[in-house]
Image: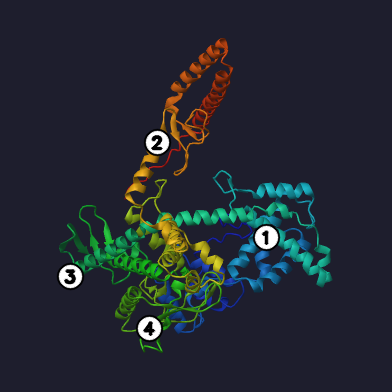
Amino acid sequence: MVRDDGHDPGVASRAPSRSRRLGDAGPAADRPGRRAELSGYWGLNRDGRVPHGIFPAWDLLRSVDVLPRNTSFKEFCHEGQRPTAELVDRYKLRCTSVRDVLVRYLDERRPGLDYTSFVALMGHVVGNFWADIEEHHPEVDSLHLPEEVALAWKERLKYVTKRRKTPQRRKTYLLMLVEVRGFYLDIQEWALDDPSWAPHAVPSPVRRGETDGLQKHRRATVANMHQRIRERLPQLPVLVETAERHRHEQENLLAAAQATAVGETFECNGIGYRRVILKTHLQSQRRSRIEAVLVEDPATGETIDLSRREDEAFWCWAIIETLRHTGIRREELLEITHLALVSYRMQDTGELVPLLQIVPSKNNQERLLLVSPELASVLAIIITRLRTSNGGTIPLTSRYDSHERVFGPLLPHLFQRRPRGHRNEVISTATVQAFLDAALARTGLRNAAGEPLKFTTHDFRRMFATEAVTGGLPVHIAARVLGHEDLATTQAYLAVFQDDLIRSYRSFLAQRRTLRPEAEYRDPTDEEWRDFQQHFALRKVELGTCGRPYGTSCKHEHACVRCPMLRMDPGQRKRLIEIIHSLTDRIKEAKLNGWLGEAEGLQVSLQAASKKLTAMDQAHARSAARITDLELPKIRQP
């Protein structure tokens, strides 16, 4: 079973062997399974990193036909897409009949899914479902599960168990139930057309009502996403400013170091440095470049690679700027090439408009984005940098698609760098997130809970959609820009702020007023205004305030204690008790003197006053019971 931490106990760990030689890889590269085994033996050093010089050595051996010419070292180390049967067999299932059904079912579903989604489906149906059943109930040998077995499995599925951690509630519990239920229902439907599925068409262990909370879970997810964007969108200018300032600081520091001879000291931004060259540096830092500019901080004795720092600062700035100006996905960002910049001439004005072609990514639909002046400046700086450092041309590189586990064709990708000093490579998705994390760490921003704020690449996409729509862009146009097929998907991206609601409601009121007679919205005369103000002055009475509307007379002849429109003042409770005692005494006096009419009228006032006292006490008790200390978090100012 594959656990949530990504570990697959069905795959044996491969320990590196120092007895393997690089030349042994030639004929073995064509044998199935041998490729991944060799990369595990000598592809990594003791630190788990690529040994220094492995890339030029690999290319040298390819040039003399010792290794295949059409296979790079990165392609050799990645095993690519594996057959369904091989993936299922990693779980070491004991029941052969169920194993064959799972392989056949996954083969049917595989053409309609990308490789990552297919592996996730396999992990749910095979790992979290059937491998777990075999582990805890080895006597079960059929998909028709007993009721107690199904209940025990669903109870285990509710929690995530990781090593050295206490069990936690699984957030994707309902989604996994839907996958398993879909597995059973698909077999039942296919059995109607293909009798070979009939022996396996059994009742699903997941009933329909058990997945009813999925819509509620999705609404809660959207609400959390909106709150996340509301929290991050106001902090976006701080992140942008910090990334740009850090980039300029590193450029100035690198320029000052390059203008200083080795062994000499210089000062930049009030800090002194000494330029050095260490012969052992390339041996201790495996990934350093030969042309690296090294300086030493005399205060701490730390050796700093300024070339690496400046390179990381530049690409961090370029990634943030491109994401916030386009709203594209992370994969689409890394797939941008120099060939994607096209132009279109407007037929009516003849104006030449620059466009950015976004290649099919998630939904296999190509789209064109208008290049704003800010985005054009960023892309121009990137192109100039690549040409300057590569002899006037943009190198052709191949991008590894982590979703499909394949390498793309050689193209002039814009987001490429030279991290190891031998060749340019397209920036990986993990490196993009690492750059964003480093930029946020420099800002010092924190969330409402006081924890360091974190951005993902998809946060930029949601912020782009929110800013575009609130800025006046129609939602259906924003959907086309973002590449959404369904308008509801774009609407779920929009985190509406309160000021937007206020502006929308005010515009609604202004539109509604245009439909009313103009006489109703004329300015009042001085006499009407004085009468209006006098009405509110007359509403103030002994026990509180009269709630009768303007323009109406008192229907109870100012008998306020009897009037249901009287709004009692809690501070007048003592006075109300005195009135009740006075009415009681006056009723006794009226009865003694035979004033029966007077006594009846006083009795009505006494009953109304007693009801108001009771209502006042009940309201006070309810408000006292609702008093709760919310313990609102204190937001730290950056």
Q: CA distance from mark 4 to mark 2?
A: 69 Å
Q: Which residue is mark 2?
A: 538
Who comes first in sequence, dot 1 or dot 2?
1
Q: CA distance from mark 1 to mark 4?
A: 46 Å
Residue visible at 32% across and 78% down in the picture: 380
The percent position of residue 220, horizontal first and vertical second, equals 55, 53
Who comes first in sequence, dot 3 or dot 1?
1
Where disc 2 sits, the SS reads helix
Who comes first in sequence, dot 4 or dot 2?
4
Q: Which residue is mark 4?
A: 353
Number of numbered markers: 4
Residue visible at 78% across and 63% down in the picture: 97
| Comparing labels 3 and 4, the label whose residue is closer to the camera | 4
Q: Nearer the viewer, residue 341 or 601?
A: 601
Who comes first in sequence, dot 1 or dot 4?
1
The percent position of residue 238, horizontal first and vertical second, equals 32, 58
Give the left or right position of residue 501, taking residue 187 as reference.
left
Q: CA distance from mark 1 to mark 2?
A: 69 Å
For residue 179, the mark is 1
Residue visible at 44% across and 22% down in the picture: 575
Who comes first in sequence, dot 3 or dot 4?
3
Who comes first in sequence, dot 3 or dot 2?
3
Q: CA distance from mark 3 to mark 2?
A: 85 Å
Crowding at mark 3 (Cα within 10 Å: few <14, some 14-19, many 20+)? few
Task: Please indicate, yes or no, whether residue 336 appears anywhere in the rendered image.
Answer: yes
| Comparing labels 3 and 1, the label whose residue is closer to the camera | 1
For residue 265, the mark is none
The percent position of residue 455, horizontal first and vertical second, equals 42, 58
